[in-house]
Image (tube, rainbow, N blue to C red):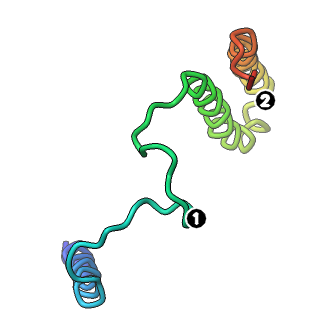
Amino acid sequence: MGAVLGLVGLLAVGVAGIYAVSAFLGLRGVVEVGPFLSGARPQEHALSRFHVRWYAVTLIFLAFDMEMVFMYPWALVVAEVGVVAVVEMFVFLGLLLVGVLYAWREGAFRWV
């Protein structure tokens, strides 16, 4: 219990130190700045709406991201589990392929 309290105390001292350095080195008053865009002014507001096409692209990205999350541990245990693990992975990849074919059919990969 003492180690946890010591760690929490160290964390509190670190956060207070960061705030103290910021207060000491930070600029005073209101600073009129905009978002950083390589020195240029942004063409649109930061909260502007995105095209609906990005929704499908995001879902495809998440599908392949989840594929990698499941494939790394699978690669470690496939030799121990055997054929069942290989069949399960091909079923999983088949489901992802169905999703990609659906997105392709809906035109998610068309950029014009």
Relative to 7, is 61 on the left or the right?
Answer: right
Q: Which amino acid, mark 1?
A: Ser
Find residue 15 and report its horizontal and vertical position in percent: 26, 77
Find residue 13 and report its horizontal and vertical position in percent: 22, 83
Label 1 element class: loop
Label for residue 90?
none
Which badge, 2 or 1, comes first in the chain's sequence?
1
Q: Which residue is mark 1?
A: 38
Say which quarter of the image contains residue 112. top right
Distance (Cα) linking label 2 and label 1? 53 Å
- Residue at (62% x, 40% y) in the render: 69
Find residue 47 and report its horizontal and vertical position in percent: 39, 40
Label for residue 82?
2
- Residue at (78% x, 29% y) in the render: 82
Relative to 66, is 72 on the left or the right?
Answer: right
Pointer 1 local density, CA inside 10 Å: few below 14, some 14–19, many at least 20: few
- Residue at (72% x, 14% y) in the render: 107
Image depth: mark 2 or mark 1 in front: 1
Depth order, front residue of 39/68: 39
- Residue at (22% x, 84% y) in the render: 23
Depth order, front residue of 93/81: 93
Find residue 73 and report its horizontal and vertical position in percent: 66, 42
Q: Which amino acid, mark 2?
A: Gly
